[in-house]
Image (tube, helix red, strand yellow):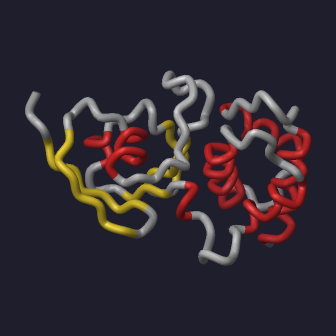
Amino acid sequence: MAELEVQLVVNGEPKKATVEPRLTLADFLREVCHLTGTHLGCEHGVCGACTVQLDGEPVRSCLMFAVQAHGRRIATVEGMAPSATELHPLQQAFHESHGLQCGFCTPGILMTMEAFLRAEPDPSPERIRAALAGNLCRCTGYQNIVTAVRLAADRMK
C-alpha cells in the first residue's frame, strides 16, 4: 500500500509524517506524535475514550484516518493545560470534585466537555448529562463528573 504524507497541527505544533492510508488518527497521535493521552477503548466509536478535537469540534479519533485530518488542527488532552504548572479549569474541577477514578475515560470526557462549555457556557446538570451521553465511564456513576463540569462552567464565566 502506498504511503501518503500528512501534515497537521497538533496542540499548536506542526506535525508531518508519511503514513499508511489506513492509520487511524488515534494511532497517529499515539505512535507518531507520542501523545498517549488519547486512549483506545472500544475502537468502534462507542465509548468516547479516543475523543479529540478536530478544528475545535469533538471527534472519535479511532473512526478517522490520519490522512483525513491532513491540513487540520487537532487538540488533545495534552494540550489543554495553559502551562506545565497550571491546569485548565475543567481539569482542575475534575481534580477537586473527584470527577475521575481510574482515569481511562477522562481524556475523552475532558475534550468533549471543553467543546461543550465553549458552546454552552451555563449548562444545567441535565444538559451536561445529555452532552456526556457519548462518553462511557465504568467507574464513577457520572455524578462527580457532572459536578466537576458545573464547577468549571462557573469558573470559566
Q: In this view, does 146 lie above or below 74?
A: above
Specify whether 12 is left or right of 23: right
Instruction: Residue at 82%, 58% (x, y): give it.
Output: 95
Query: Based on the displayed image, in which of its 4 quarters is residue 144 positioned?
Result: top right
Instruction: Residue at 73%, 56% (x, y): give it.
Output: 120
Specify whether 151 is left or right of 70: right
The quarter of the image holding the C terminus is: bottom right
Specify whether 89 is left or right of 147: left
Instruction: Residue at 68%, 34% (x, y): give it.
Output: 135
Q: Which of 99 and 36 is in front in this view?
A: 36
Expressed as whole percent of the image width and height from the top left, the position of residue 2 reads 8, 33
Q: Is residue 95 above or below residue 69?
A: below
Q: In this view, does 146 lie above or below 73?
A: above
Instruction: Residue at 78%, 64% (x, y): give it.
Output: 92
Q: Which of 25 and 40 is in front in this view?
A: 40
Expressed as whole percent of the image width and height from the top left, the position of residue 128 reads 80, 44
Query: Based on the displayed image, in which of its 4 quarters is residue 63 positioned?
Result: top left
Expressed as whole percent of the image width and height from the top left, the position of residue 124 reads 88, 49
The quarter of the image holding the N terminus is: top left
Specify whether 55 is left or right of 70: right
Expressed as whole percent of the image width and height from the top left, the position of residue 136 reads 71, 30
